[in-house]
Amino acid sequence: MLEPISVSLASLNLATLAPMLILIAGGLIILCIDLIKENLSKQLYVMLSILFLMLDLGAVIGYQGSARGFFDVMLVDGISLISQAIILFASMLFIPLALTSKRFHEYSFPEYFALFLFMISGFQFMVSSDNLILIFIGLELGSLALYAMIAMHNRPRSFEAAIKYFTMGAMAAGFYAMGALILYALTGSVEIAKIAEVLEARNYEPIVGVLAAVSFLIASLGFKLSQVPFHTWTPDVYEGASAALAGYMSVVPKIAGFVVAIRLFEFLIHADIVWVQHVLYAIAVLTMTLANIMALVQQDVKRMLAYSSISHAGFVMSAIVIGTTQANAGLFLYWILFLFTNLGAFAMLWVSRHKSKIWHDRFDHPYTKFSGMISIMPIGAVVMALFMLSLAGVPPFSLFWGKLYLMGAAINSGFIWLAVIMAINSAISVYYYLKLIVYMFLHDPITNEGTIYVKNASMSLKTIIGFSTVVTILATFFVNPLLEMITAYVKASGF
Amino acid sequence: MDSILTLLIFFPFLAGMFGFLIDQKSIRAYGITVAAIEFVLSLVLWLGFDTNNPGFQFVEKLPLIPQYGINYFLGVDGISLFLVILSTFMTLVALIGLTIEKDIKNLIVSILFLEMTMVGVFVSLDVIIFYVFWELSLVPMLYIIGAWGGKLRIYAAIKFFLYTFAGSLLMLVGILYMAYLYYQATGNWSFSIPDWQLLVVPYHLQLWLFAAFFIGFAIKVPMFPFHTWLPYAHGQAPTIGSVILAAVLLKMGTYGFVRFSLPMFPDASVYFITPIAVLSIIMVIYTAMIAYAQEDMKQVIAYSSISHMGIIMIGTFAMNAEGITGSIFLMISHGVVSGALFMLVGNIYDRRHTKLMSEFGGLASVMPKYATIFGIMLMASVGLPLTIGFVGEFLSLMGFYKVSPMMTFLAGTGIILGAVYMLSLYKKSFFGELTNEKNKNLKDLNGMELASLVPLVLLVAYLGIYPKPVLKPIDNTVKSMIQLMEKKSITKDAKQLISKVNSIEEAK
């Protein structure tokens, strides 16, 4: 006879689930509101989403309980809290970008906003668990919602992007399942901490099995983090998605992926499995270098930004290779600063979105579109230039501090050549960011009609961009408190 | 008085921000006024400067990122004081001589931002703050060259930016490594220059770190073979861009050598004396020969400016008080003289819209004032005694004579070659028959142009005859720096060389 299992509610520590449940409830409420009354305006849904996100953020920041919860599958530690905060901040910055002055297909569906909230809860699950199955569920919940959101942009290219992303994502999911399966077969557990324990006790034998599992996991996370050579979907998907969503995609799913990568690979790197470290090292270097070189030849600003965000992901991947507390803190610092700058840059493209392709028969945002923007729209040009300089790592703008700290982390743990490669890549990348600046400032305008750049602008878009600009310029002054907080959290969770 | 350095840095920045609100018509007067106030501020700094104190003065320190040892840390000593004054002075003079009409508001705002970064580089005592201003100075210059330059302006602007940016990123790796060494040695994070100067770095690491910093500085100077961006930048830049580039921005590189390379890595500096001297001599002679072959007046001056930077480098690596003091003095005099020459070329370009020497000839008969001032500046550039150019060149070469008489002799030929190309430029453009019809009715310098040039002429004469007020504070600081270097050096070679080349000084 099986013993009846009794579990006390207190031991479940349901508070760990509260943040995700808030969003799931929020998504359902949005759907219910639509059932009760049709054709409500998008402003309502945007504001409701922001409110739910705020509640969620409150639940995350105020979380005081123990790290484990819900049959021990939840793990709300320091890096989970930071990454959830990053995800929620980025989402709150992203969703007001729906309040454009032009109408767009996707925003007329409340389902879009419900999907959005479901997606965020998926990513939150992903970062707050060390159970391979729950991570998988979170990953798929987030990704499936995201595929649908891309397709809802309702242009042929968006469908293409969504299907491309979906097929690639499905393959990545398959790899992930295979990797998790092998780890389970080797150790009899799906919890990363347990797996690490068992493997260590067994001195990582059989090494072939461990390496096979790691290969599958690297491939699957490589897809999500758009690491070379699994990056091929990125530029097409970013191009097909709306500019705002592309900016969002370059930040949020990746931070979730990085947290999983930290959890998965850190113990392997510290166990001195040289092969893992070498492969990750090679991936990081290849990602930043190749993406940089491909970005050099792009004709379209959005594709350039897509490649540039691949390169930034490679830059940050080196933090996982280094694996010290300083490097992991640097990863989060970099990503927080990158969030504002990159989202701001994509939002600038979003502002200049035009229904018909008047600039080029293939691209929406060719470089020539921005010719002489300084004389037509000086403030817009200056703001865009600031974002570009920040992405290039020109001090004192925000991303410089992230680069400085990450390169410092590399040097402090003996990765001098990695730091040199990072420096050289920053130098390469400045060329394509500069190219946009050159077009905006140094070329003559091809049209004098100023409104063409601001077709899509509205108060809320301008506010978001303004906010990102202020953060980008004044980063110097809040890097220290941010760094203190991040370091404390990262240290507390033992990375 | 305590926060005068902050004021010096951020006054032009704030003024630049307010400049956006002023209309095109009045912006020039605004720019000149701001630059004049800034210049007066820098003179106040000089007035309050204690010339007998070789250390850093007017020090300000605020924590910025204490977790990583980054502070907002400013201070000025004998080495940087005159470079600050040079920056504010040349900005003022260049703004007075400004003749551009197109988008003048953007130009003046850019110049004011540039002035902030120039002053910031020279007064920063925290390496990261130094690096911030160092990199930030590229942005306004990119815009100035790219927006108001000649035909190839975009190519020149991008080349300038990429070259210097790539070099300084490698330097950043060196900076971070140095900070790590400091942390290992002391257990504290610090990016402060005075702290770093006290740190004794192991010999083999000195060589690597010296190389990392060398790339950053050498591209800026620009040393042969990294000099190829400069002729483009000068050739395409508008007059005001060339003036500031030649007068101040290039000095950032040589200042970097004096401030970082010598005191932080004395042994590596001694080790690298010969290779650097060889590169500098090539730079002096080779660019002087190229200068002679140019047909464009501005290119002659651009190459001559590289040639003189070679002498500055030689003086810096003489490792003794005469050489280093001379090279710092030469930085100032080269700033004044080459700035003036670029302005003079700008004046004739405004009138004729060409800079080719073959278009001119006999200008002395129609533009006597112009020819006189050009002549004086030419003499100063060649290094005629009793002009500002002589003092620095003489001291630099005299300093290096103690290291290697042979190489000093070779570098000295640069002065002769300098006389050759400058005098031939003068002959082709100013003497002889006035053959070209278009030159017959050229107007001589007007009031505004004279107002910008006459102060430079007076300075050339005054400091040429009586350089002591400038030399003394520089010398004080340099001497204390050399003592530090001698104390710090770990290899026997370096100790011997530093005491040998300074011995005559002590005997006096």
Image (tube, helix red, strand yellow):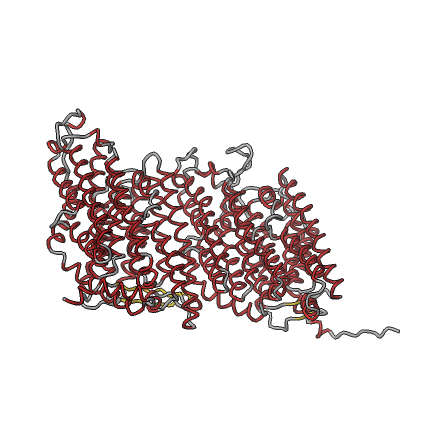
Q: Is residue A71 above or below residue B424?
A: below
For the residue pair B498 and B283, the one nearer the viewer reads as: B498
The quadrant of the picture occupied by the C terminus of chain A is: bottom right
The residue located at (15%, 40%) in the rendering is: B374
Provide residue B409's location: percent of width, then percent of height: 21, 49
Quadrant in which residue A370 is drawn: top left
Q: Going by the image, does A178 lie left or right of A494?
A: right
Q: Going by the image, does B150 lie left or right of A387?
A: left
Provide residue B92's location: percent of width, then percent of height: 22, 49
The residue located at (27%, 58%) in the rendering is: B8
For the residue pair B323 and B303, the one nearer the viewer reads as: B323
The quadrant of the picture occupied by the N terminus of chain A is: bottom right
Residue farthest toward the right in the current orientation of the protein: A1
Quadrant in which residue A142 is drawn: bottom right
Mark yes or no: residue B38 visible.
no
Quadrant in which residue A243 is drawn: top right
For the residue pair B60 and B325, the one nearer the viewer reads as: B325
Q: Is residue B354 above or below residue A437?
A: above
Q: Going by the image, does A455 lie left or right of B348?
A: right
Provide residue A291's location: percent of width, then percent of height: 54, 46
For the residue pair B379 and A118, the one nearer the viewer reads as: B379
Provide residue A235's location: percent of width, then percent of height: 58, 44
- Marker count (numbered): 0
